[in-house]
Amino acid sequence: MTDLSPNTPQMNDDCFAPIDPEALFAQSRSTHAARILILYGSLRERSFSRFAAEEAARILTRLGAEVRIFDPRDLPQPDSCDADHPKVAELRDLVTWSEGMVWSSPERHGAMTGIMKSQIDWIPLSLGGVRPTQGKTLAVMQVCGGSQSFNTVNQLRILGRWMRLLTIPNQSSVARAWDEFDDAGRMKPSPYYNRIVDVMEELVKFTLLTRDLKDHLTDRYSERVESHAALSARVNQTKAVD
């Protein structure tokens, strides 16, 4: 029978941290409104991904969140200019400000739009020694021109994981979006609208639950090993100079 006793000679015991259940409950909780940033993926005047994003914003506001929506017009293509471009700086400042995000994209040719991907590509994994997305929450939504699809939300989930975001389980996919919004851009009552309410409720709950714990939740053994090795190298180098 295979020996499954906790014999782990590969592990650096100085960097190993047993799970402390008490650490999963914040000693002090933030009292400000949850800060949510919304990104959408279309520049069309009658953009259904923007309409869905605006409905999400209304729901989030009613749930007590502080909401900001980024306008992607005039955002340059990634790598076409420096990061000090005003629209890039605006996007990055909003990401840093936020505690959670909503990504709302149309599905085009079976995938998210280039507008959506460009915004995400301008968000760095690290910014001035700070990881602006790590441990924050994310909800994903898509609108479809035809039958319901999940290609785009699935892609957005992959990107969310890559950006080290806590992507909530629920999601929204609106089929035949052109028939779900009125002439003023407001969403009609429907199960699709109800699902967006579900998603926003879940996002606010997960944001409030995790925002004071994100540093603890994303504290990784592998990174502690790297930090320990770097510290040891600096100490040894100092000793050699002395």
Image (cartoon, helix red, strand yellow):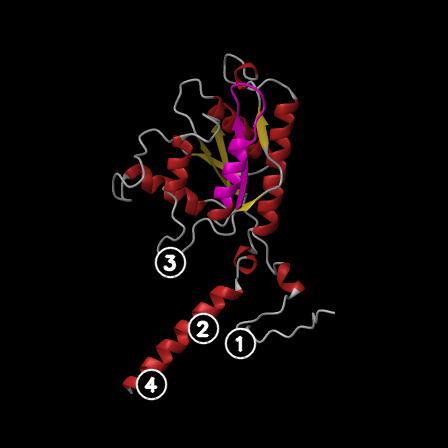
Farthest left residue?
A: 81
Q: Disc 4 to disc 3, how far (Cα)?
A: 27 Å
Identify the secondary structure beneath mark 1.
loop
Tell me the magenta residue range: 137-160
Residue 100 appears in the rendering: no
Identify the secondary structure beneath mark 3.
loop
Mark 3 or mark 2: which comes first in sequence? 3
Residue 29 forms part of the magenta stretch: no
Q: Disc 4 to disc 2, how far (Cα)?
A: 16 Å
Q: Are marks 4 and 3 in contact (CB under 8 Å)?
A: no
Identify the secondary structure beneath mark 4.
helix
> What label sits on residue 129 in the rendered view?
3
Mark 3 or mark 1: which comes first in sequence? 1
Q: Split into 4 quadrants, where in the image is the N terminus?
A: bottom right
Q: Are marks 3 and 1 in contact (CB under 8 Å)?
A: no
Q: Is residue 131 above or below residue 102?
A: below
The kind of residue tagged 1 is Asp
Q: Disc 3 to disc 2, how far (Cα)?
A: 17 Å
